[in-house]
């Protein structure tokens, strides 16, 4: 389950930020997770709860923002929605589509006290 290592990485970012800002606790963490990122949001939520136990982020709300997949279709020369990596263009059927969004996971916001 790679979500555990991802949750540990998020916690490290959160703790570094909290320390830098002299925070007493972390109230909210907002993550953007792309639909094509191979990250299972519910598994990540479970792992986040586990790794934040006994940390400055214990009890913090984890909000997950779903980021749709998009890509650049070379034959169409335009941005198209994508549901899977290496999938076909929904307009022309070509597989010459380069993912441009929806593959990422990033910490968007941390609310501290």
Image: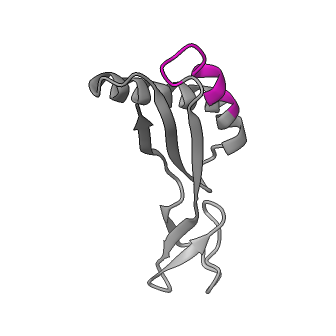
Q: Say above or below: 38 vs 17.
A: below
- Please state if 45 lies on the left or on the right of 31 as rendered: right
Name the residue located 60 percent from the left edge and 27 percent from the top edge.
Answer: 59
Foreground of the two, 33 or 72:
33
- Image quarter in which the C terminus is found: top left
Q: Position of residue 109 (x, y in %)?
A: 42, 45
Q: Position of residue 71 (x, y in %)?
A: 51, 70
Q: Give the color scheme: rainbow, by chain, secondary structure or one colour.
A: one colour
Magenta part of the chain = 46-57
Q: Say above or below: 78 vs 62.
A: below
Q: Say above or below: 59 vs 33.
A: above
| Magenta stretch contains residue 49 | yes
Q: Residue furthest top?
A: 54
Name the residue located 49 percent from the left edge and 50 percent from the top edge.
Answer: 104
| Magenta stretch contains residue 90 | no
- Image quarter in which the N terminus is found: top right
What number of labels is visible?
0
Q: Say above or below: 21 vs 64.
A: above
- Please state if 39 lies on the left or on the right of 30 as rendered: right
Q: Position of residue 88 (x, y in %)?
A: 64, 73
Name the residue located 49 percent from the left edge and 26 percent from the top edge.
Answer: 11
Q: Position of residue 81 (x, y in %)?
A: 58, 74
């Amino acid at each position: 389950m790679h979500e555990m290592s991802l949750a540990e990485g998020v916690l490290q970012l959160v703790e570094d930020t909290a320390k830098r800002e002299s925070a007493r606790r972390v109230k909210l963490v907002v993550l953007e997770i792309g639909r094509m990122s191979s990250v299972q949001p519910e598994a990540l939520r479970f792992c986040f709860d586990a790794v934040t136990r006994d940390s400055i982020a214990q009890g913090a709300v984890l909000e997950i923002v779903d980021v749709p997949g998009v890509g650049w279709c070379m034959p169409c020369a335009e941005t198209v929605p994508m549901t899977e990596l290496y999938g076909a263009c929904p307009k022309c059927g070509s597989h010459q589509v380069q993912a441009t969004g929806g593959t990422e996971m990033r910490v968007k916001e941390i609310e501290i006290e």
